Image (cartoon, coloured by chain):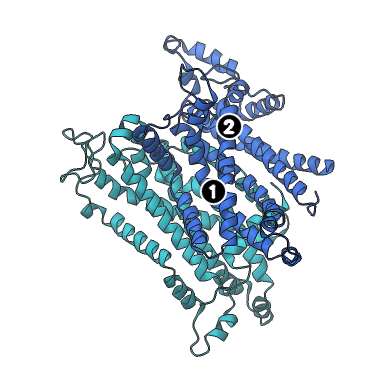
Chain colours: A cyan, B blue
Amino acid sequence: MNDERTEQILDEEAQALIGAGEAPDPRGDMKRAKAKIQSPGRIAWRRFLRHRLALGGMVFVGILFLVAIFAEFLAPYDPNVVNTSAFRTPPSSEHWLGTDSAGRDVLSRLIFGARVSLTVGVAAALSALGLGTLLGLLAGVVGGWVDSFIMRAVDVFLSFPSLMLILLLVAVLGPSIGTIVVVIALFEWPTAARIVRQMALSVKETDFVLSARAVGSSRWRIMRKHVAPAVLSPLTVVGTLLAAQAILLEAALSFLGLGVKQPQASWGGMLEEAKSLTILEQMPWMWIPPGLTIAVTVLAINFIGDGLRDAFDPRQQM
Amino acid sequence: MLRYLLRRILIAIPVLLGILFLAFVMTRALPGDPLLMMMSIEEFEASEEFLETRREQLGLSDPLPVQYITWVGEVVQGNLGVSFHRRANVAEVIAGRIGPTALLTGTAVFMALAVGIPTGVIAAIRQNSWFDYTSAAGSMLAISIPNFFLGLMAIYVFSLQLGWLPTGGLNTLGAEPSFVDSLRHLIMPAGVLAAVLIGPYVRYTRQSMLDVLHQDYITTATAKGVKRSSILIFHGLRNALVPLTTVVAIQIPALLAGTVIIETIFTWPGMGQLVLEGISRRDYPIIVGVVLVSAVLVMVFNLLADLLAAVLDPRIRL
């Protein structure tokens, strides 16, 4: 685990995300944009727009957010109301996707489930990024034994089957959205920490930081004006991928019965019923829609991450 | 070489102690009294005094630090304690579960390599062809579909609709154990588990193949008139496989995490199923035992991967 080649491979991944360890250098782009000077942000945005799959993913996730926000108006039924006259009914004009074992409307639960998945995705990704950035900056800026301690912890977290400890922690803290977010942040911070540390180390030595220091910029100003923008773009990519992972993890935990508490609707929890072979075989409307929704959502987010990675890559031509 | 091994083992000790500590603290914080979980109905009516004696016998009334130290001392001697629920030696229970998990994960890695390496090689040779793009999209899809949904789909299609394969278990109950029967039970869970691995295998094989094919010795071999197929296999693939050993090792935690879900869906009697059972029954010794065994397994395989890489690439010195 404490191996140079493992580190090399992980670093290569980090490098791919941060674009060969170089800070986005505006000078290279300026040569190309002779006529009109564009900010690096604009260039990245134009590159992103060209990435069709990423754009598609963006549109899908955007719609999903709208669905989650306006769930009350969109859902035809109350997702938690037990309807004793309609247990496990197949799709019909009344219930477009049928009803589940408690007679609840599957479509309505699917719509409300978007809230859980998106909340967990955004909150877990942000907390993991926050924790990772903090520890990564600490490691990169302070250095010394703090650096080696943090990096050793990164190695442990990356080389351990964390799902088992996550299961344990969820069992200890009791299942809820908050628990899941905390647990994911606790175990998914190392990727972000690695990248931030790497960036902090390489940016520290670049000419523009050296000259900023030479003209007397304060440490805080250098951090804010020079280091932060350089770290921000790779972190956006990592954050997107983390959100996808968090959504998958929440779904898996809920599927195992350790996620969001019933009766709250979550996509993974809806699949829990399919553990019964009768439901699996005869009532596909209860588990195929939530399964497909998770897959498409995660795919869309991964496409966005891919598009962002390409957009921020300074080596790529317009 | 010997010194390298010793150093690696010494580094592993504090890491293991840390993981043990985490697992220990978390299990003790689990809500619910394990004593109540393991009691039969008759015992349930027993007196408070009886409960005290049982706690005393199981060492549950000692202060936590004392419990931890006693327990680490026992673990070092190879004694993992007695399962509360099964009333059997934890080491024996786990030993009975390692076989099926090893079979499942081993087959999954083999299947993933068998698909991933050729796909990666072809994608590298025909860079930017439709095959390259399709395999990239396929890898993306494979990491986006939740593995439990993929598993349920597989059971639905191949077992329930087509009736080709059994829905789960190690072999057919009551039937004569045979190779064909075991294979029929193995292929679906192993295939679903492999799906997560194929993506990274394809990506890294493609990348390292591309790196190798741009080396000077490939040009030299081509200039000498060596057959293209033997250049690709003996000069290209052989060198491209070295980084892949590390990638396989890095994926082991993800693989073990996958077994928790796959073994649950396919009722495969392995360690993943055991740890879930342990969590739902508050069976501390089992949970900690499985966590410990998987941590050791991960470390051993990381070490093996490093040794293997050194054998394949003489430039790597240990």
Per the rendering, the mark at residue B198 is 1
Per the rendering, the mark at residue B103 is 2
Residue lying at 50% horizontally and 70% vertically, measured from the top left: A311
B166, A318: nearer the viewer? B166
Q: Is mark 1 on a helix, strand or loop?
A: helix
Q: Do labels 1 and 2 share a chain?
A: yes
Q: Earlier in the sequence, mark 1 or mark 2?
A: 2
Q: Is mark 2 on a helix, strand or loop?
A: helix
**Chain letter behind tag 2:** B
- Using residue A246 as the reference point, say whether residue B80 is left or right of it: right
* Mark 1 to mark 2 CA distance (whole Å): 18 Å
| Above or below, B247 relative to A280 | below
Residue lying at 55% horizontally and 18% vertically, measured from the top left: B55
Q: Position of residue A99 (x, y in %)?
A: 23, 39
Q: Where is residue B301 in the image (x, y as percent from the top left)?
A: 67, 40
Does residue B97 appear in the picture of this structure?
A: yes
Are the residues at dot 1 and dot 2 in contact (C-beta closer than 8 Å)? no
Residue lying at 35% horizontally and 33% vertically, measured from the top left: B160
**Chain letter behind tag 1:** B
Q: Where is residue B261 in the image (x, y as percent from the top left)?
A: 47, 37
Mark 2, other Cα within 10 Å: few <14 / some 14–19 / many ≥20: few
